[in-house]
Image: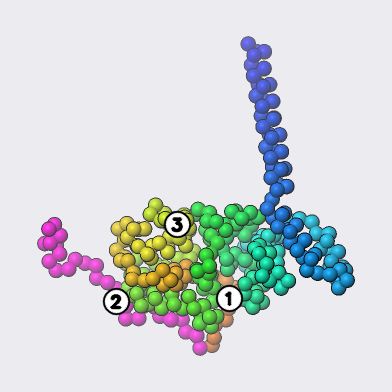
Amino acid sequence: MEKAVLRKLTTFCIVCGLACIALLGMTVIRDGQREWKDYQQEYKEMLLKKIKRDANPTFYDRVAAMEPEIRQVVIGEFKEIERCTTCHLGIDDPLFAGEKQPYTTHPNPELMKHHPVEKFGCTICHGGQGQATTFYGSSHSTIPNWPITLVSKGLMQSRCGYCHKDYEAIGADRLVKGRELYKEMHCAGCHKIDDQGGGVGPDLSAFADKDPGGFDYNYVEGGHSKQAWVIEHFKDPKKVSPGSPMSRPALSDEQIEYLATYVLSLTRREFTRHYTAKAKADFVPPKLDDVVPEPDLSPAAGDEDNAGR
């Protein structure tokens, strides 16, 4: 009996040992096939074709000797470690203007002068998971319930509103239009922003800070992200949030993007002066609840009698 038990234990240990060896081998193989290593090798080859050794032999030799490595910047203010430049190697290099992703330069070089990667990082403007080194892991594709998924192009200006409150001063036209739509649609009749507005609906003052895991995605057809939820909610509030008193707004898809951009910019996260842009001397934060009465949701006269008919 004891010999039979020992044989079973020995067999079990051998199987577990072989499984561990197999897993270790798979880890080694996968680590050698990281996509960022291929990107860095191709970037190196591209850069060597763009520069001449005669012009700067020291720099040329340094590029030629480059080995694959994780590149990262540490942004203390945001408590972020970002590795985006591990793949986006030419982000601020004029030599790579017009190249394919992920090598191309930022599409707005002037913006980069005021927001250098080493000072601001990438995720404060673009969202996503900065510590990841894979396409999926960095949230280029939607990661369900990830706090800040990569911001879509149409909603990009929502991130400008994190630091900049004077939208006109920076030419953030989508934020300006979104704020105007918020006023025109009398959203403040039901919602508060910074203590302005009604109390029927949720307070939107810190909408950008809300955990996406707290949203109901059962009726959302897009990705399970806060961006997708707010877009579809504006298109059809009662579908996305059954029982909501909010009616469907008469807005085009583009206008919905404007309004979503504004709402997604609303944060109570505070930044130091080092990051928060100075507003113009004559800038006055706009009021959003001027002459907007809180709606009367009580039944109209006679409704009680007709309710059952």
Residue 7 has which mark? Answer: none
What are the residue bounds of the magenta stretch? Answer: 282-309
Instruction: Residue 20: give x, y in percent of width and height.
Output: 68, 34
Q: Residues within 10 Å of mark 3 (few under 14, many from 20)?
A: few
Q: Which is nearer the N-term, disc 1 or disc 3?
A: 3
Q: Quadrant of residue 27?
A: top right
CA gap, disc 2 and disc 3: 34 Å
Q: Amino acid at mark 2?
A: Pro
Q: Which residue is mark 1?
A: 276
Residue 222 has which mark? Answer: 3
Q: Amino acid at mark 1?
A: Thr
What residue do we see at 39% from left, 67% from top?
Answer: 203
Relative horizontal placement of residue 48, taking residue 165 as reference (left or right): right
Q: Main secondary structure of the magenta part?
A: loop
Depth check, mark 1 against mark 3: the one in front is: 3
Q: Amino acid at mark 3?
A: Gly
Q: Which residue is mark 2?
A: 293
- Residue located farthest toward the bottom when viewing the structure as drawn: 282
Q: Quadrant of residue 55?
A: bottom right
In this rendered view, identify the residue nearer to me: 57 or 85: 57
What residue do we see at 39% from left, 76% from top?
Answer: 181
In this rendered view, identify the residue nearer to me: 216 or 29: 29
Q: Which is nearer the N-term, disc 1 or disc 2?
A: 1
CA gap, disc 1 and disc 3: 33 Å
Depth check, mark 2 against mark 3: the one in front is: 3
